[in-house]
């Protein structure tokens, strides 16, 4: 049975830190869903219990950026294949931050 949390717990943060791969899904109002695996060392950071950031290294295109600019919805998913098994999804709103941005 799924459990829902308003913010990340210490256990969630520790689980996120152990994952070598995570997945990012975005979608605009019309069109297809974009789902991409991510996972270079230190590309996902928990900034606070309600905020994360990841470095999006564009590959075959940057559909994620286009979806975030159009809609803002994003889901990140981590899968822990060790015992106990756990799938953790982070549902939220995202925005691209480019090197030229003050953020």
Image: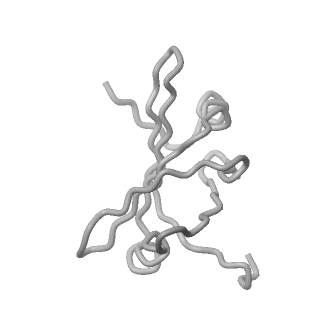
Please tell me which residue lies in front, 59 or 63: 59
The residue at the point 51 percent across, 66 percent down is 94
Left or right of residue 90, residue 100 in this image: right
- Where's residue 22, x and y in %? 53, 45
Q: Is residue 39 left or right of residue 100?
A: left
> Horizontal and vertical percent for residue 64?
46, 69
Q: Residue at x 47, y 64 (%)?
A: 93
Q: Is residue 16 above or below residue 54?
A: above
In the orientation shown, which residue stands out farthest toward the left? Answer: 30
68 or 31: nearer the viewer: 31
Which of the pair 20/93 is nearer the observer?
A: 20
Check the image and tell me how it is coloured.
one colour
Q: Position of residue 58 (x, y in %)?
A: 56, 69
User: Residue placed farthest to the front in the image?
Assistant: 60
Locate residue 88, reporting x and y percent: 47, 36
Q: Could you tell me which residue is drawn at 61 percent across and 65 percent down? A: 57
Side (left or right) of 58 relative to 97 = left
| Picture residue at 63% right of the left edge, 45% below the top | 49
Location of residue 101 (image quadrant) = bottom right
* Furthest residue in direction top, as rendered: 83
Examine the image and state in which quarter residue 96 appears.
bottom right
Q: Residue 61 versus residue 33: which sits nearer the camera?
A: 61
Q: Is residue 102 above or below residue 24?
A: below
Q: Quadrant of the N terminus?
A: top left
Query: What is the count of numbered marks?
Result: 0
Q: Quadrant of the C terminus?
A: bottom right
């Amino acid at each position: 049975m799924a459990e829902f949390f308003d913010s990340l717990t210490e256990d969630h943060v520790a689980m996120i830190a152990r994952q070598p791969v995570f997945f990012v899904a975005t979608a605009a109002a019309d069109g297809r869903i974009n789902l991409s695996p991510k996972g270079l060392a230190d590309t996902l950071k928990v900034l606070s219990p309600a905020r994360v950031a990841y470095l999006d290294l564009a590959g075959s295109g940057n559909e994620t950026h286009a979806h975030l600019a159009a809609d803002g919805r994003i889901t990140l998913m981590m899968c822990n294949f060790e015992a106990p098994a756990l799938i953790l999804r982070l549902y939220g709103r995202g925005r691209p931050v480019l090197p030229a941005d003050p953020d």
